[in-house]
């Protein structure tokens, strides 16, 4: 369904910019809450922008593996998939890179920051 402007990414950006603007004038707990809200808005912006492509890429990458990611993690922890580690490592590394790219991209090594 088509919506009139502003669209959700623009709304999130506007609210985030407002919070950035007032954060410097706040103290204590109010400042902390504003910084947390700003961080979460930035995560939401990145999730909207990157999430669908990340989900599609991961669905393709993990499609040949049985079960969901929780079952896969349990098998990796148990050592059941040690013989497949050379195949799994790049998949798991990309999974973590995708998660960090959305949650805290500045923590990524520069070679992992852009696709």
Image: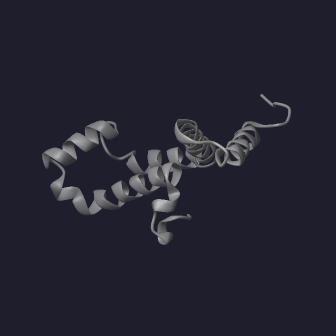
Quadrant in the rendering for residue 12: top right
| Color scheme of the displayed model | one colour
Q: Position of residue 35 (x, y in %)?
A: 57, 44
Residue at 44%, 57% in the rendered image: 97
Which quadrant is the C terminus positioned in?
A: bottom right
Q: Position of residue 93 (x, y in %)?
A: 36, 59
Which quadrant is the N terminus positioned in?
A: top right
Residue at the farthest top position: 1
Query: Please, is residue 7 above or below residue 114 in the view?
Result: above
Q: Is 24 placed left or right of 88 in the picture? A: right
Residue at the farthest left position: 79
Residue at 39%, 53% in the rendered image: 96
Query: Please, is residue 37 above or below residue 102 in the view?
Result: above
Query: Front-most of 35 and 87?
Result: 35
Residue at 63%, 44% in the rendered image: 45
Quadrant in the rendering for residue 83: bottom left
Query: Front-most of 100 and 33?
Result: 33
Q: Position of residue 66 (x, y in %)?
A: 30, 40
Query: Front-most of 55 and 6?
Result: 6
């Amino acid at each position: 369904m088509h919506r009139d402007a502003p669209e959700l990414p623009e709304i999130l950006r506007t609210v985030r910019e407002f919070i950035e603007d007032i954060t410097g004038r706040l103290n204590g707990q109010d400042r902390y809450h504003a910084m947390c809200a700003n961080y979460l808005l930035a995560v939401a912006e990145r999730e909207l922008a990157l999430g669908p492509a990340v989900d599609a890429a991961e669905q393709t990458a993990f499609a040949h593996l049985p079960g969901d990611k929780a079952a896969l993690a349990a098998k990796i922890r148990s050592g059941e998939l040690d013989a497949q580690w050379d195949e799994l490592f790049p998949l798991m590394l990309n999974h973590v890179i995708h998660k960090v790219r959305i949650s805290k991209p500045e923590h990524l090594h520069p070679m992992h920051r852009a696709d």
